[in-house]
Amino acid sequence: MKYGRKLSVELAETILKRYPDPDQYPYQSWSYSQGFMLWGFIRLWEETGEQRYYDYVMRYAGDHVDAEGNISGFTGVSLDDVMAGSVLVWAFVQTGQEKYRNACNRIRSVFDTYPRMSDGGFWHGKWCPQEMWVDGLFMGLMFLSKYGKYVADGEFCFNETAKQLKSIYSHCRRGDTGLLVHAWTENKSVAWADPDTGCSPEVWSEGLGWYAMILADVLEVFPESHPERSSLVEQFEQLLESLKDHQDPVTGLWDQVVDKETLSDNWNDTSGSAMFLYAIRKFIDLGITSPEIFGPIAEKGYEGLLEKAVLNEDGLVDIQDACDGLCVQVNYDVYVKYEKVVNAKEAVAACLWAAVIMEKNNDR
C-alpha cells in the first residue's frame, strides 16, 4: 500500500522548527517526553542517514552530560526520569565516549535502591508509593534493557526486565484477555483503586500503548536463550489478538478506553493507536507474528492515523485527538471526558515512531 505522504519527515521537520533545541520539547528539560521523541529521530536517522537528525539527538545528549558523566536534570526519583537515559546508551554506542558510559552507569545505579512492590515490581515514582503503572514499565525498561544489551550487567538487566513485565501482567491483566488496565497498587485506599484487587478501572489506550511498545523493543534485544523470552512472546501474542478484536473497523484506530468501543462517548485516541501500530509492525518485522494477519491491521490503522496528522496554514503538522499527560483516573467518565489537545507531546512522538516504521515497510 502506498500512503501518498511521508509523515515521518513532515513530523520530524515540524519538531525541528517548533523546538530547534530539543530541550524545549515539553514538558521538562530532562524527562520521558524528550527520550520518547528523540528515539523517533534516532530511528528516522537510521532509515534516512540525514545528519541533522543525528545531530539533534546528540545535541541533547551533549548538553546534558558533562565530561565526568554527570547528568543535568537527572534525579532518579521516578521511572519517568530514567527513560531519557536510554538516549545516552545510544550516544555511548555511537561515540564510545566514556562520559556517556559513566552517565549510563549513574542511571543504572538507581535500580540498586529503587523502591518496589512486595513482589519486586517497581513503583512508578517515589511520589506515588506502592503504585505500579503500566506506562512506567516503558520508561524504566527502555533504559534497562538497552543498558544490558550495549553497556554492562546483561544478566541483571534482562532478568529484571522479565520480572517487571511479568509482574505488571499478573496484576493488571483484564480477565483472560491480552489487555492490561492502567495501574495497580498495594495501597488500596488510593482513590482509583478497586478495594479488592487494587487495580485501576480501565484499559486506557495510551497506557496499554506504552506496554505494547516496550514489549516490542525489549524483544528486539532480549537474548534468544533467556528462559523468560517465550513468556514475553506469549504476552505480546495475547495483546495482539486483543488489539485485533477491538480495532475500529471504520477508522482502523483504537478508542481511548480500548475494550469499551461500543459506548457512544468513547473516541479514537491518536496517541495509543500510534503506539499500537508501532508495536504491531515491529512484532511483524521481528518475525514473531504473521504478516498476513497483522500486516493489514497495521495498514488499516496507519491510513486512519494519517487522517489525524493535519497540515496547518504554516505548513506544520498538527496531531489531533489525544490527551496530554493523563495520569491514572478514577473511572471511565474521566478518561473519555479528559481534555483533548492539539500536539499532545506523547501523541506527537508516538506518531513519529509509527510513521518511521510503517513508511520503512512501505518503501520495501
Image (cartoon, rainbow, N blue to C red):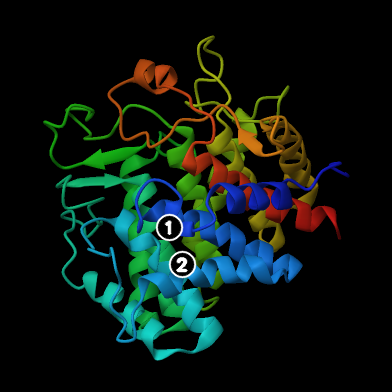
Q: Is residue 244 placed above or below 68 in the rendered structure?
A: above
Helix, strand or loop at disc 2?
A: helix
Mark 2 residue type: Tyr
- Label total for image: 2
The front one of 357 and 171 is: 357
Q: Is residue 160 placed above or below 21 in the rendered structure?
A: below
Is label 1 in contact with label 2 (beta carbons under 8 Å)?
A: yes
Q: Which mark is residue 23?
A: 1
Helix, strand or loop at disc 1?
A: helix
Q: Which mark is residue 205?
A: none
The front one of 210 and 296 is: 210
Residue 280 seen in this snapshot: no
Give the quarter of the figure containing the N terminus: top right
Please report the residue visible at 55 percent of the width from the left and 82 percent of the height from the top: 94
Q: Could you tell which of marks 1 and 2 lies nearer the N-terminus?
A: 1
Q: Is residue 355 placed above or below 92 in the rendered structure?
A: above
Q: Which mark is residue 60?
A: 2
**Does 169 sit left or right of 267 as displayed?**
left
